């Protein structure tokens, strides 16, 4: 029997969404006596209904940095269960005729990845693909920043992004890379097929070889006073534009 690994998540919304989603088993919740409000009440109610152990802690959050960041609540939870790329493709094609996936090509800041996942769930992206190396994993900070959105999206890990792109193309996905200085506007994105959007590293962008595997490179026109947008902000704009274009074409 394989023993499942556990880690922690913290923050009211992250814990609440994990309880609602039921994808990962929560084994214990630590909660400050000073934590209160509707979200805390909802957490306690769901935890009781699922027979999850809840331990009260008599500690003011201001005395401890971790507990302050945690908004008074920490949960011990099973680690994220990553799925294979093939399984991800099968799952999302059941959900949508034209699914949208995101590939992270070297995102290293957990706050950025958390914000990216939050944007993904907000705009109905169906899954996210992470490389095994040189990319942040799903951890407690990612879960906190995503406000629990990580519990509502498929996550796959791959050894080689470029090989993953090859498999995705074989399964009908149109590959869109994000890069500065490209002439293609977002409005030229194909909407009548499954699509993949690749996000590059915060400082260096996408790897050059990965760019060559893309069907299209897009950039966002903005004021020249800033060199580029934060990666999660850029994704939000792209996803909003895709959502708007789809709505316009359906009218």
Image (spheres, rainbow, N blue to C red):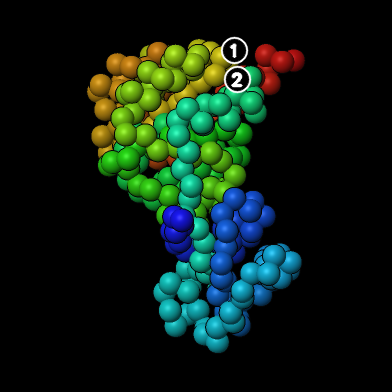
Instruction: Characterize the local packing of mark 1: few (<14), some (14-19) or many (20 or more) Cα atoms within 10 angstroms.
Output: few
Q: Can you give x and y, in whole percent of width and height, for residue 202 in the image?
A: 32, 39
Question: Which type of secondary structure does the marked residue at label 2 adopt?
Answer: loop
Residue 38 visible (yes or no): no
* Residue sitting at x 48%, y 73%: 68
* 118 shown above or below 205: below
Between marks 2 and 1, how big is the CA–CA gap?
A: 7 Å
Q: Can you give x and y, in whole percent of width and height, for residue 51 in the image?
A: 68, 69
* 24 shown above or below 64: above
* 36 shown above or below 107: below
Which image quadrant for residue 121?
top right
Closest to the observer, 79 or 149: 79
* Residue sitting at x 56%, y 26%: 90
- In screen coordinates, is 160 left or right of 243? left
* Residue sitting at x 60%, y 34%: 123
Residue 192 badge: 1
Q: Can you give x and y, in whole percent of width and height, for residue 76 in the image?
A: 51, 66
| Mark nearer the N terminus (2 vs 1) | 2
* Residue sitting at x 66%, y 75%: 36
* 211 shown above or below 157: above
Instruction: Characterize the local packing of mark 2: few (<14), some (14-19) or many (20 or more) Cα atoms within 10 angstroms.
Output: some
Q: Can you give x and y, in whole percent of width and height, for residue 231 in the image?
A: 40, 38
Closest to the observer, 42 or 38: 42
Q: Are marks 2 and 1 in contact (CB under 8 Å)?
A: yes
Q: Split into 4 quadrants, where in the image is the C terminus?
A: top right
Which image quadrant for residue 14?
bottom right
List the residue tagged with mark 2. Answer: 98
Question: Which type of secondary structure does the marked residue at label 1 adopt?
Answer: loop
- In screen coordinates, is 98 left or right of 51? left
- In screen coordinates, is 50 left or right of 28? right
Residue 166 visible (yes or no): yes
């Amino acid at each position: 029997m394989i023993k499942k690994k556990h880690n922690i998540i913290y923050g009211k919304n992250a814990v609440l969404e994990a309880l609602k989603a039921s994808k990962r088993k929560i084994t214990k919740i630590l909660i400050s006596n000073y934590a209160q409000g509707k979200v805390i009440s909802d957490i306690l109610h769901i935890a009781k209904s699922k027979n999850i152990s809840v331990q009260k802690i008599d500690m003011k959050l201001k005395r401890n940095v971790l507990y302050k960041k945690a908004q008074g609540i920490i949960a011990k939870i099973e680690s994220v269960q990553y799925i294979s790329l093939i399984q991800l493709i099968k799952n999302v094609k059941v959900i949508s005729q034209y699914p949208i996936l995101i590939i992270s090509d070297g995102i290293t800041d957990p706050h950025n990845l958390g914000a990216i996942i939050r944007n993904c769930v907000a705009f109905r992206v169906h899954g996210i693909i992470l490389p095994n190396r040189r990319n942040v994993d799903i951890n407690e900070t990612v879960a906190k920043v995503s406000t629990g959105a990580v519990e509502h999206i498929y996550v796959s890990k791959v050894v080689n992004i470029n090989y993953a792109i090859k498999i995705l193309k074989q399964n009908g996905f149109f590959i869109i890379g994000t890069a500065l200085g490209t002439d293609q506007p977002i409005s030229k994105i194909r909407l009548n097929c499954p699509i993949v959007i690749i996000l590059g590293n915060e400082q260096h962008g996408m790897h050059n070889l990965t760019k060559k595997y893309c069907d299209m490179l897009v950039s966002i026109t903005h004021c020249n006073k800033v060199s580029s947008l934060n990666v999660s902000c850029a994704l939000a704009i792209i996803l909003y534009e895709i959502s708007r274009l789809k709505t316009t074409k359906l009218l």
